[in-house]
Amino acid sequence: MLSLLRCVPRALGAAATGFRAAAPASPLPQLLQPALRPCLRPFGLLSVRAGSARRSDLLKPPAPCSCGCGALHTEGDKAFVEFLTDEIKEEKKIQKHKSLPKMSGNWELEVNGTEAKLSRKVAGEKITVTFNINNSIPPTFGGGEEEPSQDQKTEEQEPELTSTPNFVVEVTKSDGKKTLVLDCHYPEDEFGNEEDSDIFSIKEVSFQATGDSEWRDTNYTLNTDSLDWALYDHLMDFLEDRGVDNNFADELVELSTALEHQEYITFLEDLKGFVKSQ
């Protein structure tokens, strides 16, 4: 009887071993792998049809032109160059200033690409005004207004683009230890309104060490949004006494607009040369 009971575990173990051998192995790592999805779109549908013929060369790179230069010239590049040629001609026709207009008040102008700096000296003080024309043209329609349709654009004359850049005024005294820096801008809702109102505003005021090329965030900066109006008026009078007034702001807009248009034409010419180059 005892020998019979000893044979039972062996028989069960052999049966379990046979069952595991017959069952397919499915290790755990395979359960964690994503199942392969069959391609539901036939490869023939990836080609683009032109009429009834299929373009089998869609995925092939464009071949170089037949002129032998080895460069890439497509029909799109040719149309692009023709468009840029016409655009440059039209922009030069409406260009008001072939050379940059001068500022009144004995301001000296220095231009470095899209950045311009005006400087003058008044009774031992040095005043510099710096601005950049990049992103200086406001949108032609407001955010709450609907964009005009194509028919309206052709019937109505396109609005004249005006550059109204932010500009920084720096005033340095004769001792040259500190420089008063005033960050100014043209508010969109006030530009072009009544003649008595200021067409530009002071946004921030701070002191910076004279000669520092980098702006120090550790220096206190006064934001005029929460400033007492009496103090703000004195700051505006301070600028006016040094030649930064409404007349200056008007001439700055004219100068910035001329510079922006000049750089835009240069950009179109460079773009045309780049697309056309071999």
Image (spheres, helix red, strand yellow):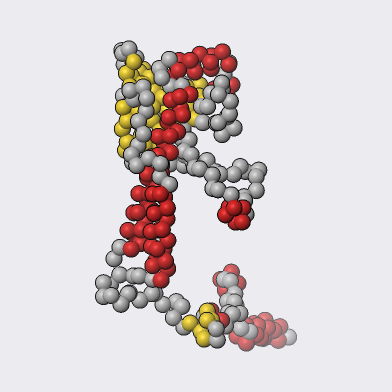
Residue 264's place in the image compared with 22, above or below, is above
Residue 131 visible in the picture: yes
Q: Where's the C terminus, which quadrant?
A: bottom left
Considering every residue shown, the one lying at the far left of the view is: 69
The image quarter containing residue 215 is: top left
Residue 143's place in the image compared with 90, above or below, is above
Residue 139 drawn at (x, y percent): 55, 43
Residue drawn 52% across the image and 27% down it: 199
Horizontal placement of 166 versus 175: left or right? right
Residue drawn 38% across the image and 71% down it: 74
Residue sitting nearer the eye, 101 or 187: 101
Residue sitting nearer the eye, 167 or 159: 159
The image quarter containing residue 159 is: top right
The image quarter containing residue 225 is: top right
Residue 206 visible in the picture: no
Residue 233 drawn at (x, y percent): 53, 15
Residue sitting nearer the eye, 211 or 83: 83
Q: How many marks?
A: 0
Residue 206 drawn at (x, y percent): 45, 21
Residue 122 drawn at (x, y percent): 34, 15
Residue drawn 59% across the image and 77% down it: 37
Residue 31's place in the image compared with 88, above or below, is below
